[in-house]
Image (tube, helix red, strand yellow):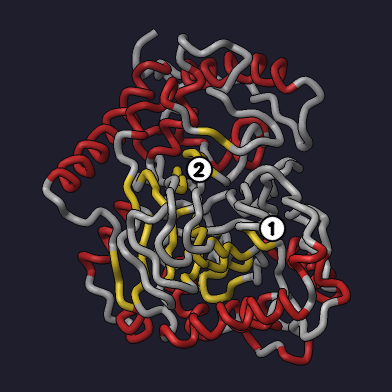
Amino acid sequence: MTATTRRQPTELPHWNTPPPDPAAAVAALKPALRDRLAAAGRSLAEVFAVIERRVTDRVEEIEAAQQRGEPVWPVIEYADIAAGTVPERDRQLLRRRGCLVVRGHFPRQQALDWDAGIVEYVERNRFFETYRGPGDDFFGSVMSKPEIYPIYWSPAQMQARQSERMAAVQRFLNGQWRNESDGVAWFDPGRDSLYPDRIRRRPPGTDSGGLGAHLDPGTLDLWLTAANQRAFRHLFDGTVEQYDPWDAAHRTDGPQYPGSTMCSAFRTFQGWTALSDMDHDQGVLHTVPIPEAMGYLMLRPLLPDVPEDELCGVAQGQVFPVLERWHSLLLRAVSGIPDVRAGDSVWWHCDLIHSVAPVTDQRGWGNVMYIPAAPWCPRNERYAAEVRSAFETGSSPSDFPAEHYERDWADRFTPDQLNEIGRRGLGLTD
C-alpha cells in the first residue's frame, strides 16, 4: 500500500458507559485504530514518528532552557491581562508551554484574608472534630489533619470564583483556544461555569510524598467514547500534522466515564490561587509544559511493545498515570513553578501532565484554592444543574466524594450573596 492509497475505514467501536470488560474493549479498539490509519494510507510508525519528533523538539528546548538557568513557566502580570496589553511574545510562550503564573492576580492582603477566613470558617464549624479522613485516595493527608479540605462553599472560595478579577483571567485563558470550527461555537469564552473544587492547606514542617505525574482529562474514555474519538480524530485519520491541542472541537460533547477522579466539566485550564507564599522548592506543582504531549500519550499504547489489552497503565476509576516505563521522553521535561506569593494564580492546560513534588520539613504554609477555567458550553451547562443543587444544600458536588460536611454549617455562602458573575456561572441567568 502506498502512502496515498486510501480506503473506507471501519467504524470504531465505542461505549457510552464503561465497558463491562475494559481489557476486551481495549483489545478490540487497538486494531480498529490501526486499521483506520491504514485506510488513510498511513502506518502507525509513520504517524507516531510525527508526534514523537514534535514532542522531542519541545523536550530538548525545555532541557536547554533549564541548563541555561532560564525560567520555563511563563509569568504574566494581572495588570496586563486586565488592560489587554499582554505582549505577543508572552501569548506565544503561553501557547507553546501550556502553563502560566498570573502575578498579582489578587492583592496579597486579600488572599491572606481569604486564607484566615477559611480557617475561621472550618474551626467555627468544628471541622477537625468531625473530619472522617480522606473521601478518596487521590490526595493524601498529613498528620491528623487533612491536607485537602473537602469544603466547597466558604465565603472565601465563592468570593474568588465570582470575582471580576477571576473572570478576566478566565476570559484571557479561554481565548487562547480555537473554540469555533465547522460553523460550531464549542464554548463561550466570555462566560465561565462555576466549577467548585476543594482547598489545600499544608502546614509548616510537613513531610509530604507529593503526587506522581498524571493527567486529569479522562482515562479509558479518551479512547473508548465516540466524542473523544472525534476530539482526537487527527491522530487516527491520517491527518496527524493537523493535530492541535488548542482545538476545542468535540471536547464539549460529553463527560468522562464515572470514576473517582472524573471531571464532568470541560476545563480549558486547571488552576489554583495561592493563599500563602510558596517557594519553588517547597513541594510545589510541576508540569511537563508540552500541550502536544497528549498526542504522544494517545498513540503510545498502540505500539507493539505494549500488551494488546493495556493502555500504558491507564485504568478505569484511577488517575491517568505517566510512567517512566512508557513515557520516559516526556518526563525529561518536568518543570516546576517559580516562587509564588499569596494572590498569584497558577494555570495549566487541561491536557498537561502534572505532579506535585515531595517535600521534607516544609518551610512556611502551602495553601491554595482550586479554581479552573471552565467556559460555558453544553457539557458545563448540564453539570451546572448539579452544582446548583449542591450549592443550595451545602452538599459536596457530584464530581467529588459524598462527604457533605457543610450542609449544616454556619456562615456558608448563600444564594443572596451571588453577584451577576456567580448567577451566570450557576446557570441562574443568561
Residue 206 vs residue 30, the one in the foreground: 206
Name the kind of residue labelled 1 in the image. Arg
Name the kind of residue labelled 2 in the image. Gly
- Find residue 416 and report its horizontal and vertical position in percent: 78, 91
Residue 163 vs residue 285, the one in the foreground: 285
Q: Can residue 291 be seen in this snapshot?
A: yes
Residue 23 vs residue 32, the one in the foreground: 23
Question: According to the image, label 2 marks what residue?
Answer: 209
- Find residue 34 and report its horizontal and vertical position in percent: 51, 17
User: Which quadrant would residue 337 be assigned to in this image?
Assistant: bottom left
Disc nearest the viewer among 1 and 2: 2
Q: Is mark 2 on a helix, strand or loop?
A: loop
Report how far apart the C-alphas of labels 1 and 2 lie in the structure. Answer: 34 Å
Question: According to the image, label 1 marks what residue?
Answer: 379
Task: Describe residue 409's horizontal placement relative to residue 184 as left or right.
Answer: right
Q: Residue at 43% across / 70% down in the picture?
A: 345
The relative height of residue 377 versus residue 61 in the rendered view (above or below) is below
- Find residue 216 and report its horizontal and vertical position in percent: 57, 46
